[in-house]
Image (spheres, grey):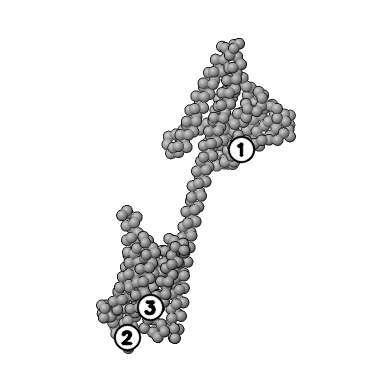
Amino acid sequence: MNRETARRLAGSVSLAVLLALAALGATHGHAVMGRPGPPEPGAWLAADWGPREMSPLVWLGAAAGAAGVAVRRFRPRTALAVAASGAAVALAGGAAGMVRVMPLVVLFSVAAAYPLRRYAALAPLAVPLVLAPNLDEPYLGALNGELLTDATVTLTLLCASAAFGAAVRVRRESVLHEREQERRRSAYEERLRVAREVHDVVGHSLSVISMQAGVALHVLDKRPEQAVPSLEAIRKTSKDALEELRGTLAVFQDPGGDAARAPVPGLDRLDDLVAALTAAGRGCSVTREGAPVRLPVAVDHAAYRIVQESLTNVVRHAGGAPARVHLAHTPEGVVIEVTDEGPARLGDPVVEGNGLAGMRERARAVGGTVEAGPCPGGGFAVRAHLPGDRSER
């Protein structure tokens, strides 16, 4: 038996003993106060508590009811049958109505543990609870109205106990359902983060590698010595991409480990992106406006990934046109604009794939926005507005 089970059992046994003593005490007091004449001082304590004062059925029924209360958390339906039967036996022996509290407590636990269909078959146990006090009355007390009164009170208490238990069960199931939904949502969002990071790292690197490989193949036959820089660039790009991919996956596999504390790439690595493109013969220029401000880590990382994906799209779709990156630092944050002079024309439909969708998600996650579309004079532009450190405002 583990500690939690022992604690619950100890609490149930303590409650069972208290309820049994309360039922016996109420019955004892009822017997003393029901004698002819005014009670003598101390009569309640001096009266005999043995079988001569109370019927053995009261003691037996109270013991059975207490046993039901004690095991109600471990065998709820069995406990309800035992407690209800014990209460009926005690009532038949002349016990006070206090003895009905024990099956009410057990019924609450049953309703909190099971839906109604799981314990509806135990409903006939309410009949003995109603009839038992009137066994010695003509027609079970129906002639003087006691039966109807007892039935109304007993059934009302039973329904209230079951209703409270059902409310507790519904609330608990609702909380568990919300927690499960939250867990699934977190897992889904985590998978999206992994997919987005892998897409950005692998997509950009493979685009650069493909461009470098094309240059190497073009000059391999006529000027083989010029293929060496492209091959070196391929080797460096693939090595860097593999290291970044390993670091990214390590962060997600061990969020609390050392890898999670490794610095994520930000705009300070923008020159590396530009160098990779220019080494492959693709023109790329960077202009800056305003005094650089310190960005939050999440915003800085999102800015880097947006520029990276934008340059990847330039390599894939701009047909060899050069790219331009413009960074404008403002008190509110940073504005990023990546343009090219590719074949896109104003009015052309924008097909939003994983790249643009990922950029929008990254910007939205840090409170920013991304706009993308053809330029009026031709080419394509991606414009992102990302907020700065709001705590400094």
Say which quarter of the image contains residue 153: bottom left
Q: Which of the two marks, 2 or 3, is nearer to us in this view?
A: 3
Q: From the viewer's perspective, tell me whether residue 211 is left or right of residue 178.
A: right
Q: In this view, does 178 lie above or below 32?
A: above
Quarter-of-image position of residue 338: top right
Q: Give the spatial CA distance, label 2 vs label 3.
A: 22 Å
How packed mark 2 is, by other alpha carbons closer than 10 Å (few <14, some 14-19, many 20 or more), is: few
Q: Closer to the camera, 345 or 111?
A: 111
Name the residue tied to disc 1.
357
Tell me what residue is drawn at x 48 percent, y 28 percent.
243
Q: Position of residue 16 (x, y in %)?
A: 33, 67
Determine if residue 300 is in view.
Answer: no
Q: Earlier in the sequence, mark 3 or mark 1?
A: 3
Q: Name the residue under label 3.
A: 132
Image position of 115 (left or right of 22): right
Q: Name the residue under label 2.
A: 35
Q: What residue type is labelled 2?
A: Arg
Residue 347 placement (x, y as % from top left)? 73, 34
Q: Tell me which amino acid carries mark 3.
A: Ala
- Type of residue at label 1? Ala
User: Which quadrant is home to the N terminus?
Assistant: bottom left
Residue 273, compared with residue 146, is above or below; it is: above
In the displayed structure, 68 sits above or below 383; it is below
**Residue 278: x percent and y percent?**
60, 21
Count of numbered badges drawn on the protein: 3
Whether residue 165 sits left or right of residue 207 in the image: it is left
Q: Which mark is residue 16?
A: none
Decide which of 331, 105 is in the foreground and name it: 105
Tell me which residue sits at (43%, 75%) in the image.
154
The secondary structure type at the circle numbered 1 is helix
